[in-house]
Amino acid sequence: MAASVADTITDKTCVVQADTLVIAMCGDIMMGTTYPSVQLPANGGRDVFLDTKAITQSANLALGNLEGTLLEGGKSTKGSGPHSFSFRTPPAYVEWLVDAGYDYVSQANNHANDFGTEGILSTERTLDSAGIAFSGINGRRESAVMERDGVRYGICAFGHNRYTLKHRDLQTVERILDDLRAKCDIVIVSFHGGAEGRDKRHLPPGSESFLGEDRGALREFAHFCIDHGADIVFGHGPHVVRAMEVYKGKFVAYSLGNFCTPYGMSLTGISGYSPVAEVRILRQGGNFVDGQIHSFIQQKGVGPRRDATCAVAREIRTLSREDIPTSPLRISESGAMTLE
């Protein structure tokens, strides 16, 4: 799992100090699928995180969103329409999550139930056996609590589907946050929300809908979480990156987009932008100190590969300045994050 405190993080962007912690976050992870046909990367998937894993391995905590199931066999719960996709990744691929240092993955997304209860149970067993924490399915694990290097982390995840813990149910969100705040040093919230597509890169005010479904009022949700004890809030779901901000001293990423989705999703243009957000926060209190947006662009059938042009960081910089101009967060063209 994530390594213990080191002297520096990759590229010396977030220097680890005794009074700070480094958290690495990414968006949607679906390492390959065997449904409806076999679409798996070369070398059994061992290279999907080749360019990114040094960052997640070195962080005090590494998190992402597991978009789909870890399962052999089973029956898809989805229909056959143009917007119907089912993802089934071989359980053995959990080895690459472990190797890359992931401590936690969210299940609160629109693919966790692609193979019904069988798929959920298989995914849970596989993650448990690998020592990777998870949460987000309604009626199952509401949150995850883990200790790393003497710090107790509480993590919860919310989505928009009927089987997930919903970010629109603020009463439940508050209850879970209250519970985590009472017993943890650092509280992190993951969410799957927002409309989807390359034309949805901007963060709108108010609620969003997609295919007739309420996808949440995400600004209000993120601020609600921080007002009720969260130290970091990070999102995914629109399949593109969105703005970032610092609100009341806490870091928010509204969408980290697709991250490792070599098959089954469009990777054209900005849909292939795949950042790792690495943030340094205070060990006491969780306030944002600084950070780095590491730029990667996906290659079909391969995974995220380093973007030397920093196009991904520049996209997030532009969106953050345009959509949340009052935020004190400043992002350089190379992705360095600081406070005004």
Image (cartoon, helix red, strand yellow):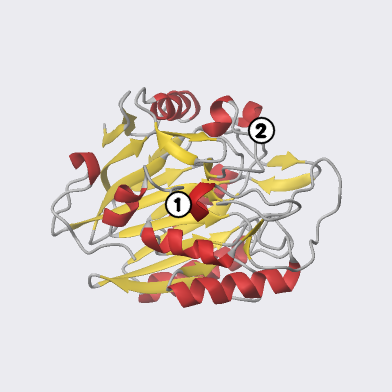
Q: Secondary structure at mark 2?
A: loop
The image quarter in which residue 326 lies: top left
Q: Position of residue 100 (x, y in %)?
A: 38, 56
The image quarter in which residue 186 lies: bottom left
Q: Position of residue 11 (x, y in %)?
A: 22, 39
Q: Position of residue 202 (x, y in %)?
A: 57, 29
Amino acid type for the residue under numbered disc 2? Gly
Determine the residue positioned at 65% across, 26% down: 199
Q: Which is nearer the eye, 136 or 31?
A: 31
Query: Few, some or many C-alpha atoms within 10 Å of disc 1 (few <14, some 14-19, many ≥20)?
Result: many
Q: Position of residue 174 (x, y in %)?
A: 53, 65
Q: Which is nearer the eye, 178 or 63?
A: 63
Amino acid type for the residue under numbered disc 1? Val
> Which of the two discs, 1 and 2, labels the residue nearer the N terminus?
2
- Look at the picture and state if 277 lies above or below 308: below
Q: Which is nearer the eye, 11 or 322?
A: 11
Nearer the camera: disc 1 or disc 2: 2
The circle drawn on residue 197 is 2
Instruction: Specify whether residue 118 is in view.
Output: yes
Looking at the image, residue 4 sits to the left or right of residue 75; the answer is left
Looking at the image, residue 200 sits to the left or right of residue 17; the answer is right
Tell me the distance, in whole angstroms, between the alpha carbons under discs 1 and 2. Answer: 22 Å
Query: Few, some or many C-alpha atoms within 10 Å of disc 2 (few <14, some 14-19, many ≥20)?
Result: some
Disc 1: which residue:
233
Determine the residue positioned at 33% across, 29% down: 331
Which quarter of the figure is the C terminus placed in?
Answer: top left
Which quarter of the figure is the N terminus placed in?
Answer: bottom left
- Look at the picture and state if 164 lies above or below 263: below
- Look at the picture and state if 318 lies above or below 214: above
